[in-house]
């Protein structure tokens, strides 16, 4: 997917040989190679940033879908417990209580005695 944006592989960098002039390496050739490396690093950082953003969006979507699934299961439980379709306030309060216990954990015995 990103192959056409990245010029160098780690092997290319490792195997790079510069021609030697009388004073040392050709500066123009070294500068060009370093420019290519910098360009690749910029591409890598852009790719990483976009993937991190996409990952965050997908995690948010997964959390929302899990919540929808929990709500659907709860609604299905309510519908299965009352095949006639009649749901009273007491039934709703009982369901909310069960849901709170699942979400927040069970109450301690002293709290249950007070209620």
Image: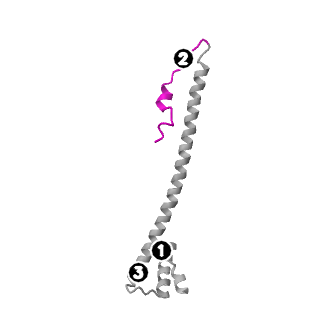
| Residue range highlighted in magenta | 1-22
- How many residues crowd mark 1 within 10 Å: few (<14), some (14–19), many (20+)? few
For marks 3 and 2 on the same chain, the one whose residue lies earlier in the sequence: 2
Does residue 46 belong to the magenta stretch? no
Residue receiving disc 2? 19
- In the picture, the quarter occupied by the C terminus is bottom right
Q: Which residue is mark 3?
A: 79
Q: Nearer the viewer, mark 1 or mark 3?
A: 3
Is mark 1 in CB contact (under 8 Å) with mark 3?
no
In the displayed image of the protein, which residue is found farthest to the front?
4
When the figure is inspected, residue 42 is found, relative to residue 21, above or below; the finding is below
Question: Which of pointers 1 and 3 lies earlier in the amino acid sequence?
Answer: 3
Q: Which x, y percent locates residue 41?
A: 56, 37
Q: Main secondary structure of the magenta part?
A: loop
Q: Secondary structure at mark 2?
A: loop
Q: Is residue 15 found inside the magenta-colored segment of the image?
A: yes
Please tell me whether mark 2 or mark 1 is closer to you in this view.
2
Residue at image coords 56%, 43%: 46
Task: Tell me residue 73's x, y (percent).
Answer: 42, 73
From this view, report whether residue 45 is shown above or below residue 110. above
Q: Give the structural element (helix, strand or loop) at label 3.
A: helix
Name the outermost residue toward the top.
22
User: Local crowd at mark 3 within 10 Å, few (<14), some, or many (≥20)?
Assistant: some
């Amino acid at each position: 997917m990103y192959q056409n944006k990245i010029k160098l592989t780690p092997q290319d960098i490792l195997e790079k040989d510069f021609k030697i002039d009388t004073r040392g390496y050709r500066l123009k050739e070294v500068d060009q190679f370093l420019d290519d490396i910098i360009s690749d690093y910029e591409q890598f950082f852009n790719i990483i940033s976009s993937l991190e953003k996409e990952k965050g969006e997908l995690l948010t979507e997964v959390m929302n879908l899990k919540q929808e699934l929990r709500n659907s299961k709860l609604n299905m439980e309510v519908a299965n417990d009352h095949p006639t379709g009649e749901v009273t306030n007491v039934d709703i309060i009982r369901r909310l209580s069960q849901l709170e216990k699942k979400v927040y954990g069970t109450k301690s015995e002293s709290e249950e005695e007070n209620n």
